Image (cartoon, rainbow, N blue to C red):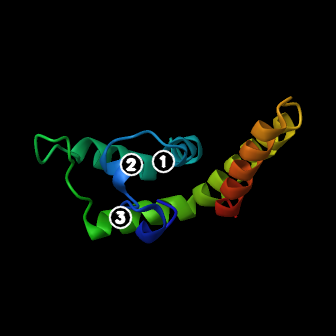
Amino acid sequence: LVVEQATTGKDSFQDFRDQRLTVLLFLLWDRAGHTADWREVTALWRGLSPTRGSGDYSALLPHERRSLMHMLERHGVIPAAFDFARQHLDAAEEQLQALPDATLRVGLGRFVHGMRAHAT
């Protein structure tokens, strides 16, 4: 829900359509779980249904996509998700220093650095 399809290779709403729990959904629930916005999210979630035997779920309509994005913006979920990612990356970098194997430390350090580039 945060980046364009060209960046990830998948539809921005695929996780929601596939009814996967994500950090964004948990943060939205935490921030808006008692509001009409959350009731709309749960209604959309329940309204998704398999369209084919392969497990694919129905597409979200353009107005539903816009509504979800507005909710995320209204409740500050996207900046909170980036903060969440940065906090975990900071913790990972601290732990890297304790690794005894330099090769592992360098490899994981590159991974963390690459992830950090996407969390800005």
Return the x and y of residue 67 as percentages of the image width and height: 39, 64
**Looking at the picture, which amino acid does disc 1 mark?**
Thr
Question: Which residue is found at the position 69% from the left and 62% from the top?
Answer: 117
Q: Which mark is residue 50?
A: none
Question: Which residue is found at the position 38% from the left and 48% from the top?
Answer: 15
In depth, the one of 55 and 84 nearer the eye is 55
- Give how far apart the Cα atoms at labels 3 and 1 are: 18 Å
- Give how far apart the Cα atoms at labels 2 and 3 are: 13 Å
Question: Which residue is found at the position 79% from the left and 45% from the top?
Answer: 106
- Give how far apart the Cα atoms at labels 2 and 1 are: 22 Å
| 58 left or right, relative to 109 | left
Return the x and y of residue 99 as percentages of the image width and height: 84, 31
Return the x and y of residue 57 as percentages of the image width and height: 21, 48
In depth, the one of 54 and 1 nearer the eye is 54
User: Residue at label 3?
Assistant: 65
Q: Which mark is residue 15?
A: 2
User: Residue at label 1?
Assistant: 35
Q: Nearer the viewer, mark 2 or mark 1?
A: 2
First-in-chain label (2 vs 1): 2
| 29 left or right, relative to 18 | right
First-in-chain label (3 vs 1): 1
Q: Relative to 49, is 79 above or below? A: below
**Looking at the picture, which amino acid does disc 3 mark?**
Arg
Would you say the residues marked 3 and 1 are in contact, meaning their CB atoms lie under 8 Å apart?
A: no
> Badge 1: how crowded within 10 Å, few (<14), some, or many (20+)?
few
Which quarter of the figure has residue 116?
A: bottom right
> Badge 2: how crowded within 10 Å, few (<14), some, or many (20+)?
few
Q: Is residue 62 visible?
A: yes
